[in-house]
Amino acid sequence: MDQQKQWTGYGMGGGWRWGGGMATATSSTIDIGSLAVDMYDSTAKQLVWSGTVSNTINPSSNQEKNEKNLNKAVAKLFKSYPPK
C-alpha cells in the first residue's frame, strides 16, 4: 500500500478577451493498493509469469465493497494468464 497526492483544479475565467478569472486547486491523499504475483517453474528455477495490478482503496470504506474491488483487480490481473 502506498499514498499519493491527488490534485483537483477548478477554474472560471473570462477568456482571452476579458482577462481575469478565478481558479482554485485542492489536494488530497489517496491510498493506492498494489498486488503482484510471480509464478515460477520450480524444476527449471525460472520465472514463468509475472503480473501486477494497482487501484485506489479506501481502508475505512465498506469492507464488502473493498473485497469486490479486490476480486475485480485479481480478475484483471489474470486476464493475461496463461502467457502466449
Image (tube, rainbow, N blue to C red):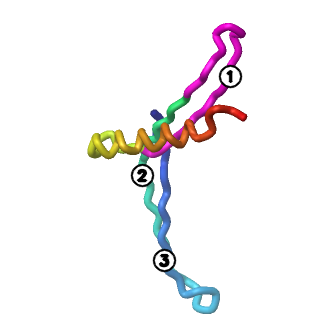
Q: Residue, x 61% and y 32% (percent of image)?
A: 51
Residue 46 vs 35, above or below: the answer is above
What is the x, y in percent for residue 39?
Answer: 61, 21
Front-most of residues 45 and 63: 45
Return the residue found at the far top.
Answer: 43
Quadrant in which residue 42 is drawn: top right
For the residue carrying disc 2, how many other residues have a C-alpha within 10 Å: few (<14), some (14-19), or many (20+)? few
Q: Which residue is mark 3?
A: 22
Amino acid type, label 3: Met
Q: Residue, x 53% and y 43% (percent of image)?
A: 76
What is the x, y in percent for residue 47?
Answer: 68, 19
What is the x, y in percent for residue 26?
Answer: 44, 60
Q: Which mark is residue 48?
A: 1
Amino acid type, label 1: Val
Query: Magenta part mainly helix, strand or loop?
Result: strand
Quarter the N terminus occupies: top left
Q: Which mark is residue 28?
A: 2
Q: Residue, x 49% and y 37% (percent of image)?
A: 74
Amino acid type, label 2: Ser
Residue 29 vs 82, above or below: the answer is below
Spatial CA span between label 2 and label 1: 39 Å
Residue range highlighted in magenta: 37-56
Which callout, 2 or 1, points to the residue nearer the camera? Answer: 1
Which callout, 3 or 2, points to the residue nearer the camera? Answer: 2
- Tell me if residue 52 is in the magenta stretch: yes
